[in-house]
Image (tube, rainbow, N blue to C red):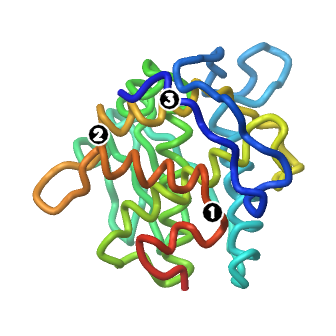
Amino acid sequence: APRSAPLIAAPEDRRTAEIEDINFGETGGNLPLEDDWDGAGSLGLYSLVEQDLNEFFGWYLDQLGESWTPVSDLVVVDSATDEVTCGGDELSGPELEYAAVYCQDENIVVIDGEGLAADLNSIGDFAVASELGQLWATAAQAQLGVADNDEATLQADCMTGFWAASTFPGIEDVTPSTDLVISSGDLDEGIIGFLAYGTSGEGSPTVFERSDAFRTGVFGAPTACEEYGPLG
């Protein structure tokens, strides 16, 4: 995985503050996934990321002159016991193993908590967050009518990078209702997640293409992800 690669200052039209000398090799502590992890009612990563992503994409689509319908729910499943309706179909058992999907008809995001999320979390909490970010980006693409573009996966990765940059300390806060802040090393966790659990098969983007798309979003303006196709 790419490490010790400093991020350069972001363009002035990207944010009101700059990102300087951030090192991918630095890592911070992991936030527990579930709520009430401290016995005092504190929110876990799932809840914080869900709130932050809904608020971020509301802001993002507004920058594009479009409206955003928040994703209705983040459904964390156990493939051994749970069933969920997605696209009008009932999914269970093997169909939910390592599942990570946006269900457009139901407007929900589904992720296998016991399999995929647990394995991503062993890499780091932002590996989980970036997987969720990619699914929220897919929801945004669906709402913009661009989900079927040839480079839709790379565009979603780019949008995920754009969201990730918004959570750095000192960057303009576009999601004031949440206190989600990531450390510089968290970006590395997202890249490693791509390496370990990225798309595969003929015609799928390579992990290097996905990493480049993610970086394009980190450094880009709201329209930067149009490099991979129109945004509406």
Q: Residue at x 66, y 68 (%)?
A: 222
Q: Earlier in the sequence, mark 2 or mark 3?
A: 3
Q: Is residue 141 above or below residue 93?
A: below
Mark whose residue sits in front, 1 or 3:
3
Give neighbour class at mark 3: few <14, some 14-19, many 20+ (Cα, 10 Å).
few
Hey, which quadrant is residue 68 in on the image? bottom right
Q: Which residue is mark 3?
A: 5
Which amino acid type is shown beneath numbered disc 2? Glu
Q: Which residue is mark 2?
A: 97
Hey, which quadrant is residue 204 in on the image? bottom left
Q: How many marks?
A: 3
Q: Nearer the viewer, residue 114 or 54?
A: 54
Instruction: Name the disc covering residue 228, or none.
Output: none
Q: Which residue is mark 1?
A: 71
Which amino acid type is shown beneath numbered disc 3? Ala
Residue lying farthest right? 176
* x and y, in percent, of residue 99 in the image: 34, 46
* x and y, in percent, of residue 205 in the image: 25, 56
Q: Residue at x 42, y 28 (%)?
A: 120
On the rendered image, what quadrant is the N terminus found in? top left
Residue lying farthest left? 202
Q: Left or right: 50 with respect to 194? A: right
Q: Secondary structure at mark 2?
A: loop
